Image (cartoon, rainbow, N blue to C red):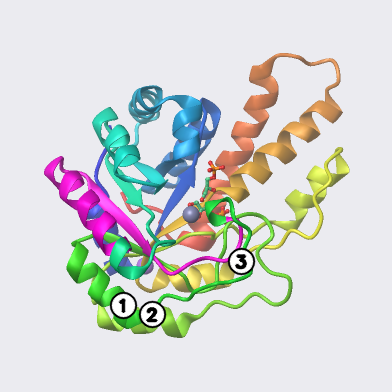
Amino acid sequence: GLISTKEMFKKAYEGGYAIGAFNISNLEQLQGVLKGAKAKNSYVMIQASMSAVKYAGPHTLVEMVKAASEEIGIDVALHLDHGPNLEAVKTCIDAGFSSVMIDGSHYDFEENVNITKEVVDYAHSKGVVVEAELGVLAGVEDEVSSDVHKYTKPAEAVEFVNRTGVDSLAIAIGTSHGAFKFKGEANLRFDILEEIQNKLPDFPIVLHGASAVDQDTIATCNEFGGNIAGAKGIPVDMLRKASSMAVCKINMDTDLRLAMTAAIRKFFAENPKEFDPRKYIGAGRDAIQAVVESKIDVVLGSANSI
Ligand code: G3H
Ligand code: 13P
Ligand code: ZN
Ligand code: NA
């Protein structure tokens, strides 16, 4: 069934690991993630952006996640990723999501506090946990491509958490969304993470934009008709270091998209006579499961957390 993140974050914080939060918008992505988690006996979060919620339908998503969780045999949190406003949050909470994010990171500090507080009041009255965001990630967040990365200010993080009563906080330490994260060397500001961790003991921190963008997967896409150039992600050793610290949730979407796309491209190229969607989407599903299992071992350290 659907569960809260309270316990899993507490255990992750104490155990020096992180919970993987994987974006989905359809059945096979969901099954791939849950089967990977089940195989590793690891908690995971299923998350959907508002555009994914619109694509699949909020009630369809909730019922599908509940049913798959029961059939595959693993409890899971269902989370709204980057909720844009209170209305979106209400839609998802009322449909049955167990966790939501309100992303007020593009507003000024006071405005971000206000909209987050409003969401926290509503969500907590329904027993739902809330993630917020402070700082701005460079890249394609908010459909705006920006070179400007506003690192989270540790003192502001403390004030923000105290004033909003939020359950977890996404911070900006150099990651970004999508497949094109760095032109030069990857660099994460672990000094900022450490300062926040010292100022907010036991408080769960979230890392967005944490796909590693595996170069073999890119090569497979391109070998079988794709055209993806210059893609670059976060080195896995940096992610594992973050998960050993106060980071309790690591968001990954791009790596699942790339793995599914590579597998389906390869399947079509190698099986030109096949037209049963279960065969090619099934190949994508298997690829997602493999990525999730590898993330649990290499990036998250969350195996056997259940
Ligand atoms: O952070 C954003 C996620 O990768 C979701 O992207 O809005 O295309 O579903 P999406
Ligand atoms: P990636 O684009 O790096 O997979 O990040 C996903 C994310 O942060 C979703 O909220
Ligand atoms: Zn994100
Ligand atoms: Na951690």
Q: Earlier in the sequence, mark 3 or mark 1?
A: 1
The residue at which mark 1 appears reads as 156
Q: Decide whether residue 122 is among the magenta residues.
A: yes
Q: Residue at x 61, y 49 (%)?
A: 254
Q: Residue at x 64, y 18 (%)?
A: 278
Q: Image quadrant for the N terminus?
A: top left
Quick check: 254 above or below 137?
above
Q: Which residues are magenta?
A: 112-140
Q: Which mark is residue 153?
A: 2
Give the SS element for disc 2. loop
Quick check: 196 above or below 5?
below
Mark 2 and mark 3 residues within 8 Å of each other at the beta carbon: no
Give the SS element for disc 3. loop
Quick check: 57 above or below 125?
above
Give the SS element for disc 1. helix
Q: CA distance from mark 2 to mark 1?
A: 5 Å
Mark 3 Cβ inside 8 Å of ligand 2 = yes
Q: Which mark is residue 234?
A: 3
Q: In the image, which is nearer the foreground, mark 2 or mark 3?
A: 2
Q: Position of residue 76 (x, y in %)?
A: 33, 40
Q: CA distance from mark 2 to mark 3?
A: 22 Å
- Amino acid carrying label 1: it is Glu
In-front residue for pair 115/208: 115
Q: CA distance from mark 3 to mark 1?
A: 26 Å
Mark 2 and mark 1 residues within 8 Å of each other at the beta carbon: yes
Q: Which mark is residue 82?
A: none
Q: Is residue 143 visible?
A: yes
